[in-house]
């Protein structure tokens, strides 16, 4: 029982630290605004697979290798680039990829818009990581505490936010890939 209490204390501390880091990076604000249909539809995007996926094969290979290695210095990975480049599509492809599924027993997808609300975000993460609350909470420390094995993949347009971890700058498709997409 003492160990579980300590694990929960560690988790709270980690979540608090992560919240402070995200807030210091200006990831959204805590103002209340209505979430439009676009935001709502993007929340589940992580579980959809693009039917016609063009390009970015080297990006996928590179990011999968970073995510699946034991290198602890790359715990936070940013996909950075201007709007419309396919950052979220790339993240989705990687999240649903076989290499990442094999490497991580527990995975969660949360879409955080400009309106960052730490408590809601972490509740959504925990719901995915611990679907059977009563049975699973006993082992929360082993599953959720970001120790050696945890990785976070984020997408952003904001280069200054991305400077706080490993940055993968996404480039435009080449001309042939652009035509293939159309």
Image (spheres, rainbow, N blue to C red):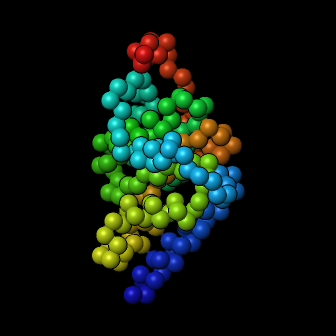
Q: State the image coordinates of residue 66 (x, y, percent, origin top left).
A: 45, 43
Query: For residue 14, which quarter of the picture?
Result: bottom right
Decide if residue 8 is in sight here: yes
Question: Residue at 36% of width from left, 32% of height from top?
Answer: 50
- Residue 28 sits above or below residue 158 on the image: below
Q: Quadrant of the C terminus?
A: top left
User: How many numbered circles does the render carry?
Assistant: 0
Query: For residue 55, which quarter of the picture?
Result: top left
Q: State the image coordinates of residue 45 (x, y, percent, origin top left).
A: 41, 43
Q: State the image coordinates of residue 128 (x, y, percent, origin top left).
A: 38, 60
**Which residue is most to the bottom?**
1
Question: Residue at 39% of width from left, 87% of height from top?
Answer: 1
Decide if residue 147 is in sight here: no
Question: Residue at 47% of width from left, 77% of height from top?
Answer: 8
- Residue 119 sits above or below residue 79 on the image: below
Q: State the image coordinates of residue 148 (x, y, percent, origin top left).
A: 45, 60
Question: Residue at 59% of width from left, 52% of height from top?
Answer: 34
The reply, left or right, for residue 14 in relation to residue 95 is: right
The reply, left or right, for residue 101 in relation to residue 91 is: left
The reply, left or right, for residue 169 in relation to residue 43 is: right
- Residue 179 sits above or below residue 85 on the image: above
């Amino acid at each position: 029982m003492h160990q579980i209490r300590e694990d929960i204390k560690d988790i709270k501390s980690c979540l608090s630290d992560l919240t402070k880091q995200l807030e210091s990076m200006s990831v959204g604000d805590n103002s209340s605004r209505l979430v439009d249909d676009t935001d709502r539809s993007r929340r589940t995007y992580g579980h959809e697979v693009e039917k016609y996926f063009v390009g970015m094969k080297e990006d996928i290979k590179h990011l999968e290798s970073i995510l699946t290695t034991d290198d602890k210095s790359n715990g936070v990975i940013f996909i950075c680039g201007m709007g419309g480049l396919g950052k979220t599509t790339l993240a989705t492809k990687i999240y649903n990829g076989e290499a990442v599924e094999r490497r991580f027993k527990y995975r969660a997808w949360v879409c955080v818009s400009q309106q960052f609300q730490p408590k809601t975000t972490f509740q959504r993460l925990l719901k995915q990581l611990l679907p059977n609350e009563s049975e699973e909470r006993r082992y929360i420390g082993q599953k959720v505490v970001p120790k050696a094995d945890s990785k976070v993949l984020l997408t952003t347009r904001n280069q200054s936010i991305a400077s706080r971890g490993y940055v993968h700058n996404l480039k435009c498709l080449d001309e042939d890939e652009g035509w293939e997409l159309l």
